[in-house]
Amino acid sequence: MGWWKVNADTLAGSRFVVSPLAEATARLKTLERGTAAHPGERAWLDAHLPGYRERLAGDQVTALLVRAALGRSWNATFLTPTPAGEGEQVFEEELARIRETPPEAARADLAVSLGGPLPARLHRSDLPARAAELLEWVWTEAVLPSWPRSRRIIEADVIARTARLGQGGWAAVLDGMRPGMRWLGESRLQITTGDDPPRELSGARLMLVPVTPGQSWVSWDAPNRYAVVYPCSGALAEAGRAPAPGTLRALLGPARADVLVLLDTPKSTSQLVALTGQGLGSVGRHLKVLFDARLVRRRRAGRSVLYYRTDAGEVLVEAQRDG
């Protein structure tokens, strides 16, 4: 199996990072593979896949480049740079790192991801620029219009995982973050189930990068920075794409209806703030009204209070969906 040796100092310095480029790359992988992780992602894919295929149909070199870059077991390294800082990254600055890749380095990365020699049509110097242009198109056409909502889903995922840190330590945060990833103990973090050599991360910065599509990968700029890009919780990602039915919004008010719909799984007030974009006070007032109406219940989980729908709340939401 492939695992990283992560000491206490590295864990203590770990950070969640919001990367617009990682989100755009994850969307590119979804478009290229044509598969969706949940119904909300399927709706997005159905809306944008025709335009993506039309764009590549008129640019066979870029189409071949994407197929080579998104290999079965490894992405071309230049296409997935490790975030260079903390907090939220700037898309244009991230994209510039791809565009500025030396052509010979891009071709070497593609040979690795392809698992063999490059096709003759990829022996050219404009591959980094082509990759950057395609990612910029994906960002502009298929990510940016819904980025505020996607960003709220990402923030909600970070809140949920931070709560797990307080309840179960880093093992609770890292286990299952991406397929095959789990904490093995003795400073070992399993990254994949494949037969990859272990890597020593002592002294390095570990960054955890959530994205909304069901895609994941790892990257590093050894020996200083390593990153795990992982998909947000499916329930969160789907909830962020499922607005309340119009009849329910008319009955309860749009903001309160959105809160009730999101409570199909237990969520904290902070998660609801992140997912809805509403203020803390507004969410708190909506929860009180819903609680008093016996449409939601609450329970404590560690330091958090989680809210969830009652049977009556379930019946109300489903009746309006059916209508």
Image: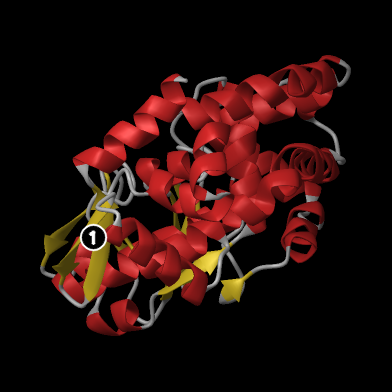
Mark 1 residue crowding within 10 angstroms, few (<14) / some (14–19) / many (20+) = many
Residue drawn at (83%, 38%) of the image: 130
Q: How many marks?
A: 1
Q: Whole-percent x and y of residue 64? A: 72, 22
The answer to which image quadrant residue 90 occupies is: bottom right
Front in this rendered view, residue 66 or 41: 41
Q: Whole-percent x and y of residue 231? A: 43, 46
Is 307 drawn above or below residue 115 in the view shown?
below
Q: Whole-percent x and y of residue 63? A: 75, 22
Residue drawn at (72%, 29%) of the image: 65
The N terminus sits in image quarter: top left
Residue 208 visible in rendering: no
Indicate the amino acid at tag 1.
Leu
The answer to which image quadrant residue 172 occupies is: bottom left
Relative side of 111 to 197, left or right: right
Relative side of 104 to 13, left or right: right
The answer to which image quadrant residue 100 occupies is: bottom right
Residue drawn at (33%, 79%) of the image: 10
Front in this rendered view, residue 151 or 128: 151
Q: In what element is the residue under mark 1?
A: strand
Residue 26 visible in rendering: yes
Front in this rendered view, residue 43 or 66: 43
Is 54 drawn above or below residue 205 in the view shown?
above
Residue at the spot of label 1: 189
Relative side of 78 to 299, left or right: right
Front in this rendered view, residue 148 or 292: 292
Q: Whole-percent x and y of residue 170? A: 22, 70
Residue drawn at (70%, 49%) of the image: 105
The color scheme shown is: secondary structure
